[in-house]
């Protein structure tokens, strides 16, 4: 399973919070984050690792497609239920003051 975001501004934040809510054995799931630029080149942002739960975020330094990937392929006999929340938050841009306001 994966969730993708197209980020149009650097300094956006991508945040996640996930946990497994059901499962018998091997109560973990693989998770990674990758970036794909406009040329199709992929860069691993967060390497694949197995987690029971995790929350985190990072500030983007490139525009393009970010993909959060959950992988349970190593556990072929046990289904799991994943609860997750993901967000892509654009950067806060301060309004510019006009010259007359700044000069007073």
Image (spheres, rainbow, N blue to C red):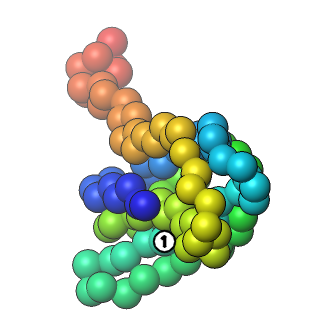
Quadrant location of residue 104? top left
> Residue 97's spot in the image, x, y percent?
30, 25
Residue drawn at 40 percent across, 44 percent down: 88
Instruction: Tell me where residue 51 sits by quadrant.
Output: bottom right
Residue occupying the far top of the picture: 104
Q: Position of residue 18 (x, y in %)?
A: 59, 42
Q: Is residue 73 left or right of residue 28?
A: left
Of the 4 image quadrants, the one containing the N terminus is bottom left
- Can residue 31 be spotted in the picture? no
* Residue closest to the far front: 77
Q: How many residues crowd around disc 1 within 10 Å: few (fewer than 14), some, or many (20 or more)? A: some
- Pick the residue in front: 96 or 91: 91
Against 75, residue 101 (above or below) is: above
Decide which of 2, 9 is in the foreground and name it: 2
Q: Circle 1 sits in a helix, a strand or a loop, which is it?
A: strand
Return the x and y of residue 77 as percentages of the image width and height: 61, 67
Q: Which residue is depicted at the point 37% across and 30% down? A: 94
Q: Residue at x 30, y 31 (%)?
A: 96
Looking at the rendered structure, the number of numbered marks drawn on it comes to: 1
Report whether 43 appears left or right of 58.
left
Dot 1 corresponds to which residue?
Answer: 34
Examine the rendered structure and indicate whether residue 53 appears above or below residue 97: below
Between residues 102 and 33, which one lies in front from this camera angle? Answer: 33
Q: Evaluate whether residue 49 shows in this view.
A: yes
Residue drawn at the location 24% of the way across and 20% of the way down:
100
């Amino acid at each position: 399973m994966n969730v993708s975001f197209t980020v149009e501004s650097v300094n956006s934040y991508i945040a996640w919070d996930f946990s497994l809510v059901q499962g018998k054995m091997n109560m973990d799931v693989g998770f990674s984050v990758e970036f794909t630029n406009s040329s199709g080149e992929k860069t691993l942002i967060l390497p694949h690792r197995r987690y029971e739960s995790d929350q985190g975020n990072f500030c983007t330094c490139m525009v393009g497609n970010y993909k959060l990937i959950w992988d349970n392929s190593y556990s072929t006999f046990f289904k799991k239920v994943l609860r997750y929340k993901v967000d892509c938050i654009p950067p806060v841009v301060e309004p510019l003051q006009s010259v007359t306001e700044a000069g007073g």
